[in-house]
Image (spheres, rainbow, N blue to C red):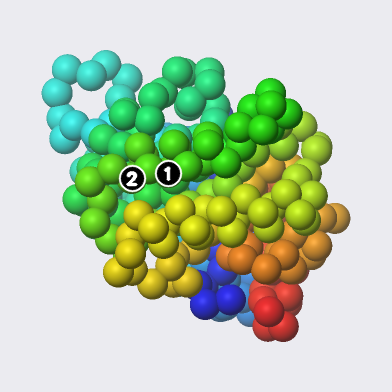
């Protein structure tokens, strides 16, 4: 593994600012020995203000708008996030794509805005169950990557999260073969798209029902540089166990 491993906790629409603050403080205290894993907390927007974390911990946001400011009721700009100390922003999460109908074009605008602000996008890609069943997985991943990263010149600031839609929040995890197949496809697509970049330095992480029970097997899959964790990141014990498992396993990768 070349990229520093990442464990990111996507809390979705869970936890008040007070709960977020005490969760983060408690986790940091339980993870004092961890310094080989980047841990990213992604609370709702309201939990980002006035939150301070230090290496190896970072703050991330779950979404953003691509414009700097203006008449976009309910939206948050990248500059506002940066002012809260955010370093990462999730883009194209399957819930944004499928529940809020976000298109690859919107996702691309967001990626560009995030990179322009010197923050790091966590670009989520993944196929639905129907797409996998009908043999469209490769095409979907290729389209999401190519369209989502259009006009991006460098991979230097990018995390890709492969999250098969059918594995998110379902308790069904992709198999070792499915994860390693998808990740090597992602690397092939990126190396064609960014011919002069060093793909090995760009973290590619897996998400979809990661728990302390399956984390060891999944992080051992060649090419997996970490996890985007939803449900299991809401509980201090399970989230910190996943981080400790990744920290232990990466030594041997
Ligand atoms: P999950 O969510 O771990 O609950 O499947 C992952 C995600 O939505 O990023």
For residue 57, above or below residue 164: below
Element carrying mark 2: loop
3D distance between C-alphas at marks 1 and 2: 6 Å
Does residue 18 appear in this view?
no
Of residues 230 and 219, the one nearer the viewer is 219
Does residue 113 appear in this view?
yes
For residue 98, above or below residue 181: above
Number of labels in the image equals 2
For residue 130, above or below residue 232: above
Residue linked to disc 2: 149
Of residues 195 and 104, the one nearer the viewer is 195
Q: In the picture, which quadrant includes the N terminus? A: bottom right
In which image quadrant can residue 234 be found?
top right
Residue at image location 64% in from the left, 79% down from the top: 33
How packed mark 2 is, by other alpha carbons closer than 10 Å (few <14, some 14-19, many 20 or more), is many
Element carrying mark 1: helix
Residue linked to disc 1: 145
Residue 205 at x, y percent in the picture: 57, 56
Q: Is residue 214 left or right of residue 106?
A: right
Q: Are marks 1 and 2 in contact (CB under 8 Å)?
A: yes
Residue at image location 28% in from the left, 43% down from the top: 150
Residue 27 at x, y percent in the picture: 63, 60
Q: In the picture, which quadrant includes the C terminus? A: bottom right
Residue at image location 44% in from the left, 37% down from the top: 143
Of residues 133 and 27, the one nearer the viewer is 133
Residue at image location 33% in from the left, 60% down from the top: 194
Residue 221 at x, y percent in the picture: 72, 65
């Amino acid at each position: 593994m070349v990229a520093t491993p990442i464990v990111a906790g996507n809390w979705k629409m869970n936890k008040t600012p007070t709960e977020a603050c005490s969760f983060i403080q408690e986790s940091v205290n339980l993870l004092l020995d961890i310094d080989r894993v980047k841990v990213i907390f992604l609370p709702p927007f309201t939990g980002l203000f006035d939150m301070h974390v230090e290496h190896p911990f970072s703050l991330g946001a779950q979404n953003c708008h691509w414009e700097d400011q203006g008449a976009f009721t309910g939206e948050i700009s990248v500059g506002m996030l940066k002012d809260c100390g955010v370093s990462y922003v999730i883009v194209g999460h399957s819930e944004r794509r499928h529940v809020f109908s976000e298109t690859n074009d919107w996702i691309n605008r967001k990626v560009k805005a995030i990179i322009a602000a010197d923050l790091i996008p966590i670009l989520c890609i993944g196929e639905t169950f129907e797409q996998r069943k009908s043999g469209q997985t490769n095409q979907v991943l290729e389209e999401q990557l190519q369209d989502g990263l259009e006009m991006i010149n460098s991979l230097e600031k990018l995390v890709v999260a492969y999250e098969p839609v059918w594995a998110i929040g379902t308790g069904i995890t992709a198999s070792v073969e499915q994860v390693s197949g998808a990740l090597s496809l992602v690397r092939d697509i990126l190396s064609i798209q960014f011919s002069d970049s060093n793909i090995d330095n760009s973290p590619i992480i897996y998400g979809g029902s990661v728990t302390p029970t399956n984390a060891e097997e999944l992080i051992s899959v060649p090419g997996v540089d970490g996890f985007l964790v939803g449900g299991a990141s809401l509980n201090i014990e399970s989230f910190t166990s996943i981080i400790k498992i990744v920290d232990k396993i990466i030594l041997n990768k």
